[in-house]
Amino acid sequence: MLEKKDSYRDTYQAFRWDIPDIYNMGVDVCDKWAQSDPDRLAIHEVSEKKLSRDLSFGAMRDMSNRLANRLKHHGIRGMERPGDVGDRIGVLLPQCLETAVAHIAAWKMGCVSLPLFSLFGEEALIHRLKDSGARAVITNREGARKIASLRNDLPELALVLSIDGIDIGAFGFHVEIQQESPVFEPVVTRADDPALLIYTSGTTGLPKGALHGHRVLLGHLPGVEMHHDFLPLPGDKVWTPADWAWIGGLMDVLMPALHLGLPVVAGRVEKFTGEWAFDFIHKQGIRNAFLPPTALKLMRQVPEAKRPTVRMRSVGSGGEALGHELLDWGREVLGVTINEFYGQTECNVVLSSCSSLGVNKTGFIGKAVPGHVVEVIDDQTGDVMPTGEQGAIAVLSPDPVMFLRYWNRPDATAEKYLDGPRGKRWLLTGDQGLKDDEGYIQFVGRDDDVIGSAGYRIGPVEVEDCLLQHPAVQMAGVVAKPDPMRNAVVAAYILLSDNYEPSDDLADEIAQFVKHRLAAHEYPRVVRFIEEMPMTTSGKIIRASLRAMAQAEAKAEQEAKV
């Protein structure tokens, strides 16, 4: 989609969107290649036990068709007319062949796929499955057993398939699909028809579902091609340690690579380490990777004597800013200039760096990706801010990568947009920034309370709600505490219930309570007991006061190390 010109300016000005009226993501990333080159490698999966499986585009078409037929046999229904929303199908799996197949089958059926982290606890799963009204879930043994204990709370869930075979409340995925034909006629979908529902954390309530149309993949392509210095080139091979349930793994890596016909490596490991990452990149011959900043920081800690020599063609990173030291390290050790990019679940990869175009400036995210208009505006009037002045980072609507709406939340959808002068309508990212005289945008900070930790966006409300279910917790406030490795960690400030006394054991018990119910990246790594919770007169927790406490503690810890 993106054609490289002599300069960024020429590349930006020459770009034109080509979004067809009729478009289906599943057909695009799978059937298109299966028809022209069925033996072409789509996914190479390497498990923790070093076992591997390969999936060609032809085999991926046949498997996804069999799955679509079987889901239909069990009463799962796709859209019946343009604009309909098909049944929601949860995909509760780590990086593996079946994850891709499940999404593709859902899209070819005219259904909506629902990515779910395999580490989600019961409360996180109940909220997403119940709020979305999911009718089916495709998972593994671990996920099937989690869901079995939740079925009474999920009246609309009709079918669970486990890739590990028959289990409690679950049919065996592979046994089921082998009963079906590999021939399936994909539903004719428009580019704007619903296809993907991804829940994103916020501060005004529980996570909201961002509903995307089939066109969201096409909207991602220019940004992905830009931060990978113009994919595809001969020999490119793509990987990320990011979970495919996250938009960064699913839509920044897996699906764009399949669209381009590039092989994707699926690599699963229970605990990510820098040593493992270097070994994996070296042995698998990875040329192109999306490496979140935390992954890069862990890799930087590996001594030269313990890492193999790797030379990559492109590395993209997003989620938090990279400093000049990490960028210099990337040039020396990885052989590339790491290209930073920016986006969010509702409107992803709209700013990017691109070393092959000379678009790199330390301390700045990058420039607007061709096809997207991104400005720093006054969030009251919609006026573009003068150069160098801080304001709200906003994206001009309409835009192919932009979400359709929040699921069941018209109020939140309306709040996401701002009408400005001359009929311009802006999507507000909720982030603050400034633009310099060269067109680079600098991220200044979030204007809400979402915690950015290790590339994840974590909403404090969901964590606080979980904390309050522990009998020792009377009141809880959750904020970000600065952390040199993860950018920030979740810090919980707790007012204890009567008959409970502060202790290290209780702090650990409370942290584990959240970890097991939500997810490993959401639990509070810092638990502090306080005697009085800062509150407004209307009864709201003053998180700014808690943030100040967390920042002071982090500063004191840093000074103690010096």
Image (cartoon, grey):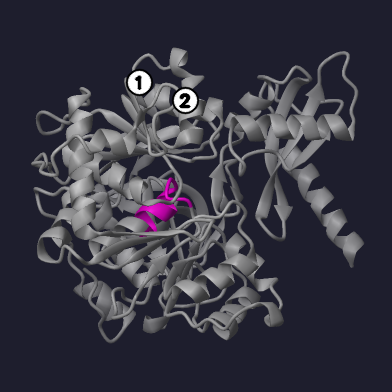
The vertical placement of 312 against 19, above or below, is below
Q: Mark 2 points at which residue?
A: 147
Image quarter (top left, top right, bottom left or bottom right) of the C terminus: bottom right
Does the segment drawn in magenta span residue 92? no
The vertical placement of 13 against 25, above or below, is below
Check if mark 2's residue and mark 1's residue have beta carbons within 8 Å.
yes
Q: Quadrant of residue 237?
A: bottom left
Q: In this view, does 499 lie to the left or right of 196?
A: right
Where does residue 89 sit, x and y in percent of width and height? 31, 32
| Number of the label disc, if any, that sits on residue 562 | none
Where does residue 244 sit, x and y in percent of width and height? 42, 50
Visible in this render: residue 397? yes
Where does residue 274 sit, x and y in percent of width and height? 63, 67
Helix, strand or loop for the magenta stretch, by majority: helix
At a point 32% along the width and 27% down the height, the residue shown is: 136
Q: Along the polypeptide, which appears first: circle 2 or circle 1?
A: 2
Visible in this render: residue 369? no
Q: In this view, does 391 lie to the left or right of 188?
A: right
The vertical placement of 258 against 84, above or below, is below
- Highlighted range, magenta: 243-253
Q: Please state which amino acid type lies under the numbered disc 2.
A: Ile
Q: Which of 41 and 526 is in front in this view?
A: 41
Q: Name the residue under label 1.
A: 157
Q: Quadrant of residue 356?
A: bottom left
Q: Please state which amino acid type lies under the numbered disc 1.
A: Leu
Q: Is residue 286 left or right of residue 549?
A: left
Image quarter (top left, top right, bottom left or bottom right) of the N terminus: bottom left
